[in-house]
């Protein structure tokens, strides 16, 4: 059974966030975190998405993830392609009251990224409970509606 998520806007400016894994999905999450001012560290055995190496203002640690990495972390993104490993990360984070987003599960997480539309006067975030394509479609519909006015 899934969680019932409370919608909340959070200031990530200067917050320590780690992304475990370095593929295409990790790249997108890293860019989002950077856009909101997070201090991002990527922990990965190898960088699968070369574009990650071009990003500014991130720390890349090419090594195994350790539970010690969770010290003083605000948010974790479990972005490996190993669902069992991501579930272990989720459990460790959840037990330590750390926000965690898991790329391989709709339920083994306590935080979701939303599809966001921003203008000068409004910020709208959409979650479709783990179905990102649906969230993007709804966000785009809202964007069209708001930009007409």
Image (tube, grey):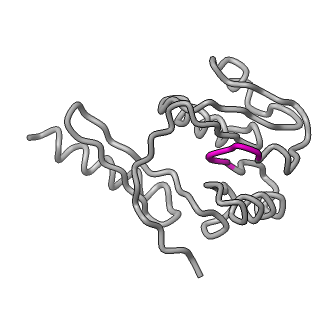
x 47%, y 33%: residue: 36
Quadrant where the N terminus sits is bottom right
Q: Position of residue 3 (x, y in %)?
A: 54, 74
Q: Is residue 58 left or right of residue 133?
A: right
Q: Is residue 145 left or right of residue 86?
A: left
Q: Is residue 139 left or right of residue 15?
A: left
Q: Is residue 22 left or right of residue 68?
A: left
Quadrant where the C terminus sits is top left
Q: Which residues are magenta?
A: 71-77
Is residue 72 one of those drawn in magenta?
yes
x 11%, y 40%: residue: 148
Q: Position of residue 10 (x, y in %)?
A: 44, 46
x 65%, y 60%: residue: 97
Q: Position of residue 27 (x, y in %)?
A: 64, 34
In this view, the residue in front, 146 or 30, is 30
Kindly indicate the quadrant of the structure image that contains residue 50.
Answer: top right
Kindly indicate the quadrant of the structure image that contains residue 16.
Answer: top right
Kindly indicate the quadrant of the structure image that contains residue 43.
Answer: top right
Is residue 21 one of those drawn in magenta?
no
Q: Is residue 71 above or below residue 126?
A: above
Total numbered circles: 0
Give the residue at the far left of this rendering. 149
């Amino acid at each position: 059974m899934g969680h019932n998520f409370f919608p909340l806007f959070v200031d990530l400016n200067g917050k320590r966030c780690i992304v475990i894994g370095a593929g295409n999905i990790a790249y997108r999450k890293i860019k989002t975190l950077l856009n909101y001012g997070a201090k991002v560290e990527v922990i990965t055995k190898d960088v699968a998405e070369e574009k990650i190496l071009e990003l500014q203002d991130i720390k890349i640690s090419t090594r195994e993830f350790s539970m010690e990495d969770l010290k003083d972390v605000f948010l974790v993104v479990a972005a490996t392609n190993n669902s069992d490993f991501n579930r272990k990360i989720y459990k460790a984070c959840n037990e330590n009251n750390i926000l965690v987003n898991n790329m391989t599960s709709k339920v083994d997480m306590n935080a979701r990224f939303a599809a966001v539309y921003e203008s000068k006067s409004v910020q709208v975030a959409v979650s479709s409970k783990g179905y990102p394509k649906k969230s993007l479609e709804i966000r785009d519909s809202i964007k069209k509606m708001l930009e007409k006015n």
